[in-house]
Amino acid sequence: MAKRKIKVLVAKPGLDGHDRGAKTVATVLRDHGMEVVYTGLHQTPEMIAEVALQEDVDVVGLSILSGAHMSLFPRIREELSQRGMGHVLLTGGGIIPVEDMDELHSQGFAKLFGPGTNTVEIAEWIETEVEKLWSEEGAKR
Amino acid sequence: MKQSTHDQSAPESRVVSVNGRAKWEEATAKAKLRDANFTTLSGSELKPVYGPDDVDLDFDRDLGHPGQFPFTRGVHPTMYRGRLWTMRQFAGFGTAGQTNERFKFLLDHGQTGLSVAFDFPTLMGYDSDQPHSLGEVGQVGVAISSLEDMELLMDGIPMDKVSTSMTINGPAPILLAFYIACGENQGVDPTKLRGTVQNDILKEYQAQHAWLVPAEPALRMITDAMSYCAEHVPQWNTISISGYHIREAGSTAAQELAFTLANGMEYVARGVAAGMDVDEFAPRLSFFFDSHLDFFEEICKFRAARRIWARKMRDVFGAKDPKSWMIRFHTQTAGVSLTAQQPENNIVRTAMEAMAAVLGGTQSLHTNSMDETLSLPTEKAVKIALRTQQIIAEETEVAHVADPLAGSYFVEAQTNRLEEEAEKYFDEIASRGGVVACTDAGYIQREIHRSAVTYQRAIESGEKRVVGVNAYVEDAGAKPEIDIHRIDPEVEREQCARLANLRERRDAAQAQAALDGVRAACRDGSNLLERFITAAHAYCTLGEITQVLRDEFGEYKEPKIL
């Protein structure tokens, strides 16, 4: 049976224009055989959750370097849950202090990545985590 | 070949040199070399050594004297003997009052010019209390939503004495209007104001991404600002054509050079097309470059920039005033070169990048703080960054001699190489219909993205090494032991409350009339900056003014890059 492709939404919430990291990660994930949707810049939480739903993605990866993560990330998680997308693997990266990463983790975010992260590591981590989710889903059925 | 006599043009030393070259080639061919990638940071192949055969150089044509065409050696005859570069640290966070305090701190510690960082809502033309601004107010810069905020920002700072640089683009003419109006309220005539607005919208579309309206109306606002200031605010630099963001977004050194100068030429062409004489506005154009880690490549980039611009302005645009030929530029060390790992190492990186900027002849310099991959800088980190410049200026003795590396085979060969690479891009851009068409089509954005991915792969394969990231790594999971500068969420509430209060207090009819004036100018083509100044005095907010522009001109939509 052909293996299902992992589908990832790479999203830029907030007003910051730093998309070098998001676009680089998107390119690397595609090279790893994933299907990647990139939102473009300046997205609101509602817009991101709506695209996640429409595209029926497995993973949402948020990139933010503006310092607004504590305001925006929890709202994105809520918007996803409201659309029945609470099951997606929710991750991200950017300029996020370690304390904030811990807090977001306790709110249901999976791993968040900081500057200097190897992008292949991100791709492999996503593969592993999605496999886990899929096998849990399979077990439930 | 053996020489028979001593009076021929090729002297014995030449024989020695030819023999020496053969011996050297033999020696290096056999030698075992380090396992390393011998290219520039931007991926250009480097020879192991450079000599006269590598350089086509005519002193008068290619170098000249400092302060003379083609300005390769610097824009002033005396360079730093006359005056050191301006030490200008970019700063801004929280409320106008908080940033005002930081400005006074920097001025007290010997900084010689101000540089304002705005928060993202301001950069995008939103008021602090608009829905898009949620969570962003005061985070990466100061929130300025009205003339009142500008008055708080400049409180107690003599606007006729300091020069102020404002990093703002989409809504740049509006912030400039706030500044001019603020000066008038301080009793300072606009002719006394000195400073710069970045106002470079093309590189926003290409790299930095804080935009407002589409290219054509945005370019019109820029030419409106150029013509208004030429007449009324003559010491103001109405645009700072910026390669910094292009480089930080991932471009190579050559791409930074090429795209920045291509943008610059577009602005000049627009000014001329709007009916101005090139010498009327070109002397007020300023530039802004990145100084990255490749020491020599960066120095050569600065030299090449001066030479290319001088040639284009004189020979292509027919400028007569030597001031129009000169590229005067600000430099910032490369934020993207800083690492979150072992952050103290960033002091060393910044020092070397700053040294390259000085040897490259910059007019002003911002040195990054060691903690900027973690948060906005703390006061201590900012002070070290400023002291880095002061140590270069006062202790290293490098500022005594203009263009000290000229004549180096390597430096001249790289300067020529960068100029050639830039010329290739100019041809490519022209063949694709010019820089605006290239930007609307996403060509420049894709070129930058391609370089960013190539660089990331080079780091991940270990071809390029970064201390603390893929070499000399210390425990990766450790939390950095460095203070974090956090913005209190109270800032957003305070700012929103002040705005609500301002809207209550101001003369509503006067504000509405001023906004109607802006709308009329959008339609009838009269100078927009003049109307923005009237609106500033009426305490119209940034978001109200940009809403008129968005209604009249539409919003910019980014092309699909991926």
Image (cartoon, coloured by chain):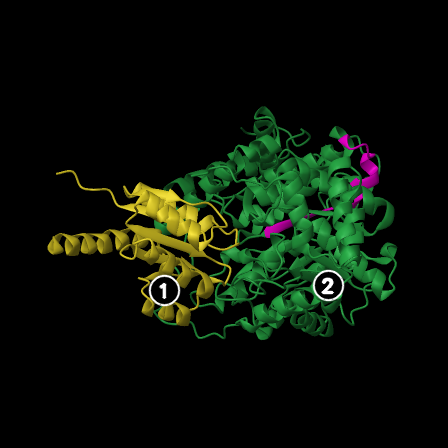
Chain colours: A yellow, B green
Where does residue B390 sit, x and y in percent of width and height? 68, 68
Q: Is residue B407 visible?
A: no
Q: Please name the amino acid that badge 2 sits on.
A: Met
Q: Please name the amino acid that badge 1 sits on.
A: Val
Image: B7 above or below B323: above
Where does residue A76 sit, x and y in percent of width and height? 40, 58
Residue at mark 2: chain: B
- The residue wearing badge 2 is B150
- Label pair 1/2, CB-CB below 8 angstroms: no
Q: Nearer the viewer, residue B385 or B83?
A: B385
- The residue wearing badge 1 is B473
Q: Per the image, is B284 magenta?
A: yes
User: Which label lies toward us, 1 or 2?
Assistant: 2
Q: Which residue is located at x 69 percent, y 30 percent?
A: B7
Quadrant of residue B400 within the rendered picture: bottom right
Q: Which residue is located at x 67 percent, y 44 percent?
A: B549
